Amino acid sequence: METINWSDLTFGYMKTDYNVRSHYRDGKWSDLEITDSEFLNLHIASTCLHYGQESFEGLKAFRGKDNKIRIFRMRENALRMQESSRGIMMAELPVELFEKAVVEAVKRNERFVPPCESGASLYIRPLLIGTSAQVGVKPATEYTFVLFVTPVGPYFKEGFKTTPVVIYREYDRAAPLGTGTIKVGGNYAASLVAGTKAHEGGYSAVLYLDAREKKYIDECGPANFFGIKNNTYITPQSTSILPSITNKSLIQLAEDAGMRVERRAVPVEELATFEEAGMCGTAAVISPIQRVDDVAENKSYIFSADGKPGVICEKLYKQLRAIQYGDAEDKYGWVTIL
Ligand SMILES: *Cc1c(COP(=O)(O)O)cnc(C)c1O
């Protein structure tokens, strides 16, 4: 067996020993299938290839100081994947089968769960695709669920720090009544042009505005947005934002810390009033924002002149990480210990 250099890990793909699958046929999901193959045998007319019948999820498992492995809020991911299925007319995977697949894949790839001190974790990627052969535009009758895992490095290799993000008013991520609220590959395909341009411009992400009026903050490409002011945690509400499980968790922690929480439309000019701002998602938990450049308006909103994260971002980040690694009490039953 090859040895893994845990400190070299990035957010990339590494082959592990097994992945698990289930197939939907004749109205029924099959028992889990365990395989060491990294490939799928797909029909060329599968609906996922032509009409984007695909959804995915992302969650993580962590090894604590006690050497136990903890999986964070997997039931939430199972429920969200069902929501995605309803959004693009795919068969819904039962929650229990989703959870069983997660546990099975993590257990069988236990040697890939990084040691606690590395700050790395095991990324879990479930995906669901339409697989029956069709050329007419209609939902598939058969589906395949695949779940694989891969070890990933800590998001913050040189410590918790801020990055700049950008508003490009000439791009939208999702339509107001479109697929923004579900986790489908199509949303990501639609964000690649703007996302690549942002990276080339030295930004870590695009901050999208509402597509209809360009007045309100929506979310970043792969992460929700929040701002902090007057001991209040403010996060946008709209009909095109993906409900982030990390955001939901941070809201709970903010309330527990005695902060007020507001979920509402956030006008872009309000950026000027935030003491701190951040992006949140499974990959980083919180990625604090240094500044937002609104290119077309020639405006810059600065949250951190010296590049250091704000105190509230740092506190919430550390608290959530502590729960994930088992260093803090899991008051809400968010963690599944293997
Ligand atoms: C997955 C995702 C997020 C983050 O969700 P988490 O459950 O916190 O990982 C945010 N925005 C979009 C568009 C996403 O696809």
Image: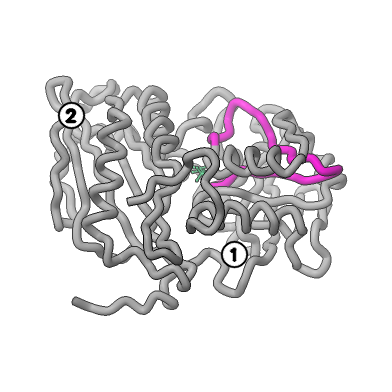
Residue 20 at x, y = what percent? Answer: 20, 47
Element at label 1: helix
Is residue 205 inside the magenta stretch? Answer: no
- Of residues 136 and 318, the one drawn nearer to the viewer in this rendering: 318
Reply above or below: 265 against 163: above
Task: State the image coordinates of residue 289 (x, y, percent, origin top left).
Answer: 71, 56
SS state under label 2: strand
Compared with 91, 45 (above or below) is below
Q: In this view, does 329 lie to the left or right of 127?
A: right
* Amino acid tagged 2: Trp
- Residue labelled with disc 1: 200
Q: Which of 334 and 242 is in front in this view?
A: 334
Residue 222 at what x, y percent from top left?
Answer: 53, 47
245 or 45: nearer the eye?
Answer: 245
* Residue shown at 15% from the left, 57% from the top: 36
- Which region is colored magenta? 221-243
Residue 258 location, quadrant: top right
Distance Cα–Cα, label 2 vs label 1: 43 Å
Image location (x, y in percent) of residue 142 = 18, 28
Residue type highlighted by circle 1:
Glu
228 magenta-colored: yes
- Mark 2 or mark 1: which comes first in sequence? 2
Q: Mark 2 points at which residue?
A: 29
Question: Visible in this render: residue 329?
Answer: yes
Disc 2 + disc 1, Cβ < 8 Å = no
Locate the N terminus by quadrant.
Answer: bottom left
Q: Which residue is drawn at 22% across and 27% down?
A: 135
Numbered disc in front, either 2 or 1 = 2
Q: Which residue is drawn at 61% across and 59% down?
A: 204
